[in-house]
Image: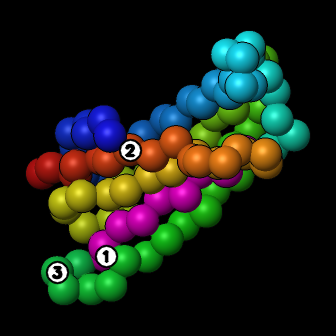
Amino acid sequence: MPVFNITHGSTVEFTAGFFDGNGVPTMPSSATLTVAYSTGPGTTLVSSVIGMIPAGRYFMTQWATSQSYLGDVNYSVQAPGMLVPTTGLLRLIG
């Protein structure tokens, strides 16, 4: 899983492309980004589900890191028909 260091307070732009089982680019009917983050020390994780906007052959959206406390933020991108979502990790730094 990729890990990206991001400065807290910035906005992260997500762009996702999708492919069928043969590796051919495909455009699903919709896509969502789920971001799981902590709002403070010792707090439980909060999940935000954000709809992605079609842009040509891709889907795009943004997430403001100011919603989260410093540390690890897990994300996943999902589209209808996907068996396994694409996942990654952001590390919010000061």
The answer to whether residue 52 is seen in the rendering is yes
Q: CA distance from mark 2 to mark 3?
A: 22 Å
> For mark 1, does the 10 Å Cα neighbourhood hold few (<14), some (14 to 19), or many (20 or more) residues?
some
Residue at 61%, 40% (x, y): give it: 61
Magenta residue check for 33: yes
Q: Which residues are magenta?
A: 31-39
Q: Position of residue 58 (x, y in %)?
A: 69, 24
> For mark 3, does the 10 Å Cα neighbourhood hold few (<14), some (14 to 19), or many (20 or more) residues?
few
Checking the image for residue 39, the label placed there is 1
Q: Quadrant of residue 74?
A: bottom left
Q: Quadrant of residue 40?
A: bottom left
**Disc number lying in front (2 or 1):** 2
**Where is mark 2, residue-wise?**
88
Amino acid, disc 2: Gly
Disc 1, SS: loop
**Disc number lying in front (2 or 3):** 2
Q: CA distance from mark 2 to mark 1?
A: 19 Å
Direction right: furthest residue: 29
Magenta residue check for 36: yes
The answer to whether residue 62 is seen in the rendering is no
Q: Position of residue 31 (x, y in %)?
A: 72, 45
Of 38 and 24, nearer the camera is: 24
Say left or right for 6 vs 20.
left
Q: Position of residue 25 (x, y in %)?
A: 74, 16
Amino acid, disc 3: Pro
Say left or right for 17 vs 68.
right
Query: Which quadrant is home to the N terminus?
Result: top left
Disc 2, SS: strand
Checking the image for residue 41, the label placed there is 3
